[in-house]
Amino acid sequence: MKQFIKIILNKVIILGVFITILQACNSDDGVVSCVPTTTVSVQINTNLPLYSNLNNPGGWVYVDGVVAGSRGLIVVRTASGYKAYDRNAPHICPGEKTTLYVKDDIRIVCDADESEWILLTGQPTKVANRAPRTYQVIVNANGTLLITN
C-alpha cells in the first residue's frame, strides 16, 4: 500500500512540474526576460532641424537619453503616424552587438545574429521571431511628439 501511494505521489509531482513548465512557456509576453524594462518619457519637437527627417513618411531619427529606452530609440514617420522602437534587440539578451540600427533607410538590423525587421512596421523578416519593443507616440497639435510607455 505504501509503495502504491509513493508511485502515485511521484506521478502527481512530475505532472505538476510538467504543467508548470508548459504554462511558463505559454505566458510569453513578447519580450525576452533578460531585456531590461525602462521608463520612457521623451518629447520631440519635429519643427527643429535635428528632427526634420520626421516631417516625411519613411523618415527616421535616433533618440538618446536617460529616459529614452534601454539603448535609445528609433523614431520613424509612417504613412499613418509615428512609431518608436527600443534599440535593444527584442529576441536575445543584451550584448555587445545587440543594439538595433537602421540600414538603407528601410530595415532595422541587429549585428549579433543578422536579424532584420521592416522599419515602417517592425515586422521581423530575418532570424528574429518578434518585433522590437514599441512605445506609445502621442502627437500634439504644435508638432511635438510625446513618446512614453
Image (cartoon, rainbow, N blue to C red):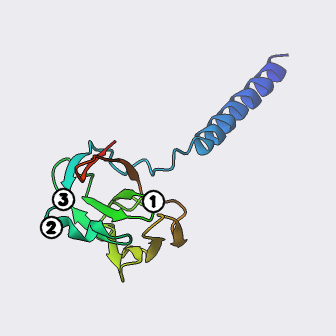
In the picture as drawn, the residue positioned furthest to the top comes out as: 1
What residue do we see at 42% from left, 64% from top? 78
Secondary structure beneath label 2:
helix
What residue do we see at 73% from left, 33% from top? 15
Q: Is residue 16 left or right of residue 108?
A: right
Q: Which is in the foreground here, disc 2 or disc 3?
A: 2
Quarter of the rendering containing residue 52: bottom left
Secondary structure beneath label 3:
loop
Quarter of the rendering containing residue 59: bottom left
Crowd tier of the residue under label 1, counting other residues whose Cα lies within 10 Å: few below 14, some 14–19, many 20 or above: few
For residue 33, above or below residue 14:
below
Quarter the N terminus occupies: top right
For residue 13, above or below residue 130:
above
The disc label shown at residue 50, or none = 2
Relative image position of residue 70 (x, y in whole percent): 27, 53
- Type of amino acid at the residue the image marks with label 2: Leu
Crowd tier of the residue under label 3, counting other residues whose Cα lies within 10 Å: few below 14, some 14–19, many 20 or above: some
Q: Which residue is mark 3?
A: 64
Mark 2 and mark 3 in contact? Answer it, CB < 8 Å. Answer: no
Q: Which is in the foreground here, disc 1 or disc 3?
A: 1
Q: Which residue is mark 1?
A: 80
- Type of amino acid at the residue the image marks with label 3: Asp
Closer to the chain start, of discs 2 and 3, is 2
Secondary structure beneath label 1:
loop
Q: CA distance from mark 1 to mark 3?
A: 24 Å
